[in-house]
Amino acid sequence: MSKKVSTSSKMIQILDENGELHGEIPKELNNEQIKKIYETMILTRAFDQTALALQREGRMLTYASTFGQEAQVAAAFALEKDDWFVPSFREHGVFFARGYPISQYMLYWVGDGRGMQIPKDINCTPISVPVSTQILHGVGIAWAMKLQKKKNVVEIFFGDGATSKGDFHEGLNWAGVFKVPCVFICQNNQWAISVPRSKQTASETIAQKANAYGFEGVQVDGNDVFALYKVVKDAIDKARSDKGPTLIEMFTYRLSDHTTADDAKKYRDEKEVEVWKKKDPIDRLKKFLLKKKLLTEDENKKIWEQAQATVDAAVKEEESMSPMKSEDIFTNMYAEIPENLKEQIEEAKRVSP
C-alpha cells in the first residue's frame, strides 16, 4: 500500500491585507531581513514601472510585468548561497534578491543575449519564455545534484498556465519517483493570458495536484511574505534532507496585463482587479512595518527614492553599453567552443561584423 501524502486544503496565511498577524513570523527572519525583503520588493516594483515606461517609449521589447506579485522575493530569501533557482519570465524580484545585476537584466529585455550570460556566483538558468519547459530543466539540475550527493536545492518557478502542460506532469512525476531535491513554486496569478484558472483545470486547487505524484502540496497566500517564506523554507529544509519535493501554490494576482502585447481589459472585469489591489503585497508589509515602528513614512519615501535611483542608474549603464557583437551569441554556450562553432563564428563576423 502506498503511503498517504498530505496536501493542505486550507490556505496558509500569517499576515493579512491590513498588516495584522495571524500567526508567528518565521524565526529565521529578523527585523533587518524583513526590511531587506521590503526594500527588494520596492526595487522590483520600481524596475517594473520603469520597464513599462521604457517599452512604451520603444526603448525595450515586449515586457512581462510582475506588478502585484512582488512577494516572490521572500521565496528567494529562503535559499542558501549555493542553491539554484529556475525562472519562467515573471521572476524579476527573485533575480534581484539573488544579486543579479539590474543593468545586465535589462539587457535581456532589450533583446541583447548578453543579458542572460549568468554571473558565475549566481546559480540560475536563463529566463524561459516557452511555458513549462523550465520545469524539466530544474528537475534535471536537482536530479544531477542528488546523484553527485550535493545538499543543494532547486526552486522552480512557473505560472498556473504551466500546470496544464505535459512538461509539468513529466517533471513532477520524475521528481516524485526519484525524490529529487526541488521545490516547485506555482505563481498562480489566476490568468494564463486571457484564460482564467477555472477554465484550465477542474482541480479545486493546484496544490492538490501534488497528490498524484506522491509528495506534499501546499497552498499559501502569495501576497503574504511571512507565510510564503515559511512554506518555502520548510520545503527547502525537507528537500535538503532527502525527503523529496514539494509543490507550493502561491495564490496571488496579476494586477497588470499579461505582457505589454496584451490588453486585459478585453477579458477581465476591472472590479476583480480593484479587489486584488487591496491585497497588494507591498502595501501589506508596509502597514505591518509602520505598526511595529520598524519603518517611518520618511524612511519609506527614502527607500522608494533609492530604489528609483538604482534603477535609473541601471538604465543609464545598460543604454551606454557597446552593441552586442555577432560572435557574442556563441560565446556563452560551451566552456570550450567546438570546431564547428568556431567556423560559424568566423562566418558571422564576415556577414555581420
Image: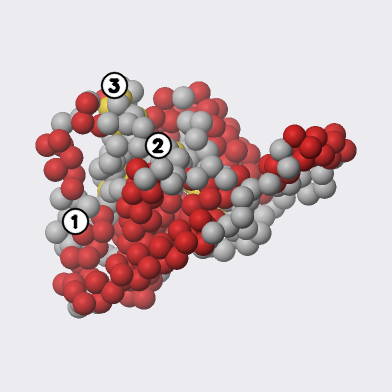
Work out whether residue 67 or residue 352 is closer to the camera in this orientation and state it: 352
Work out whether residue 43 or residue 348 is closer to the camera in this orientation and state it: 348
Residue shown at 35%/37% (left/top)? 260
Residue 241 visible at all? no
Work out whether residue 297 or residue 28 is closer to the camera in this orientation and state it: 297
Residue type at mark 2 is Gly
Disc 1: which residue:
16
- Disc 2 from disc 1: Cα separation: 23 Å
Disc 3: which residue:
199
The mark found on residue 159 in the picture is 2
- Determine whether label 3 and label 2 are within 8 Å by CB: no
Figure colour scheme: secondary structure
- Disc 3 from disc 1: Cα separation: 28 Å
Residue shown at 30%/26% (left/top)? 194
- Disc 3 from disc 2: Cα separation: 15 Å
Residue 14, percent from left and from top: 24, 58
For marks 3 and 2, the one nearer the N-term is: 2
Q: Is residue 244 above or below residue 225?
A: above
- Few, some or many residues within 10 Å of mark 2 (<14, 14–19, 20+): many
- Give the number of the mark in front: 3 or 1: 3
Residue 121, percent from left and from top: 63, 62
